[in-house]
Amino acid sequence: MAAAITDYVKFLGDARIAVDSLNCDQNTRDQMETERKRLERELEAARKAMTDQISQTTRKRRDEITAGYDKEIAKGQESLRKARQSREKARNKGMKERIADETSELREHNRELKLQLKTLFQQNRVPAYCSSTLYYALYSPRGIRELGILLCTVVFCFLALPCLIYFLIPNRQSWYLAGVYFADVILFGGIYIAISNRTKVRYQGVLKQGRLIRNTIRANEKKIRVIIHSIQKDGNEDIYNLEKYDDEISRIENELSQIAGRKKEALNTFETVTKNIISDEIADRHQEKIRSLEQKKAETQLALKELDARIREENIHIMDTFGPYLGKEFLQAERLNELSRLIQDGSASNLTEAMEMYRGQGEK
């Protein structure tokens, strides 16, 4: 049960002291809370700076290790490429020499046949163009190549050329096309027959001999192509003496394999050992500042905890001791001073009268 108040001025003075103490502690708490938040931000920034430095440093060192090995690997791959190119050149050179050796008799035979054909035509005074492939394709075609030449010539002379001429004629009419075709047939047909009468009929025997010689040349060329194809498809490369190139390629490939293995081992060592050492060294440099901030933060939190307990007790004391008489409305320093003045100057004889007078003053 609350005791009766005998000295209102002292009661109000005690209330004023209690309220001032509470306000002072609350202000102190606000300052300490601000300080705690500042320390927390600094601690978080210090930890982040340490983490970022560890991350950046380890990434840089890992990249340097990778770049160093990749540079050596690139050099090895370039050496391997050059070694393979040298081997391929040596193989191609050997293959060309083999082709030249195995086809030499056929090529020599063809040279003799061509000379024989030229001599035959000269001795019989046959025009030189009669020995050309185009002539034989037009007047005595044999084989796919000559038949193709004949077909292309016919298409050009009797289809493409007349159409081209027709489309170049301004204000053309459909009957022009018939005229163009008629002129084309007369022109090229006449030329074809004239050359035939002048050469094919007159030198028929010589042309037949030339045909036989050309057939032999063509047969030899086919044999040469077969030999070349057979050599190119031959998988046996022992005859080209490529052992030194194969040894060099094997040596480079082995070196590349060793470098790749050492790179993997170096990166594994870095991840399992070196990275931890670097992280510990960086952490040690930051640890003093972090521990200092952690200690200050812990001290501030402990002080806040103690201050909160004191504020809680002060609130309870004020509410238990002064709250029942004054209420929350008058538990303020300036109002407590005013109530004390009203009682001291005799305007009010007790707390109730003083509070009513204070309210009355506020209404005026």
Image (spheres, grey):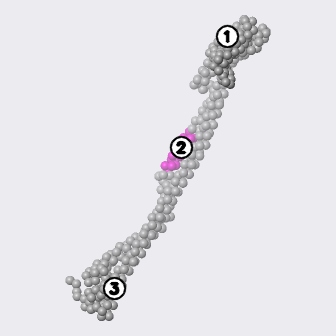
Residue at image position (28%, 91%) is 348
Give me the disc on residue 364: 3
Calculate the distance from the C-alpha at mark 3 to the C-alpha at mark 2: 95 Å
Q: Earlier in the sequence, mark 2 or mark 1?
A: 1
Q: Amino acid at mark 2?
A: Ala
Q: Specify start and end residues of the magenta stretch as a single range.
A: 254-269
Question: In the image, what residue occupies the spot 71% across and 14% down?
Answer: 187
Q: Which label lies toward us, 3 or 2?
A: 3
At a point 28% along the width and 78% down the height, the residue shown is 316
* Residue 144 among those drawn in magenta: no
Q: Quick one: 174 or 307, which is closer to the camera? A: 174
> What's under tag 3, amino acid-wise?
Lys
Task: Give x and y (percent) for residue 112.
Answer: 73, 14
Q: Is residue 301 left or right of residue 183?
A: left
Inspect the magenta stretch and tell me whether residue 263 lies in it. yes
Asked if one can make out residue 76 in the rendered structure from this viewpoint, the answer is yes
Quadrant of the rendered structure where residue 134 is?
A: top right
Of the pair 156 and 104, the residue shown nearer to us = 156
Gap between marks 3 and 1 measured at Cα: 138 Å
Residue on which disc 1 sits:
140
Report the residue marked by disc 2.
Answer: 260
253 over 306 or under it: above or below: above
Q: Is residue 101 left or right of residue 259?
A: right
User: Which quarter of the figure is the C terminus placed in?
Assistant: bottom left
Mark 2 neighbour class, 10 Å CA radius: few under 14, some 14 to 19, many 20 or more:
some
Magenta stretch: dominant SS?
A: helix
- Residue 159, numbered label: none
**Is residue 206 visible in the rendered structure shown here?**
no
Q: Earlier in the sequence, mark 3 or mark 1?
A: 1
Identify the secondary structure beneath mark 3. Answer: loop
Give the amino acid at mark 1. Ser
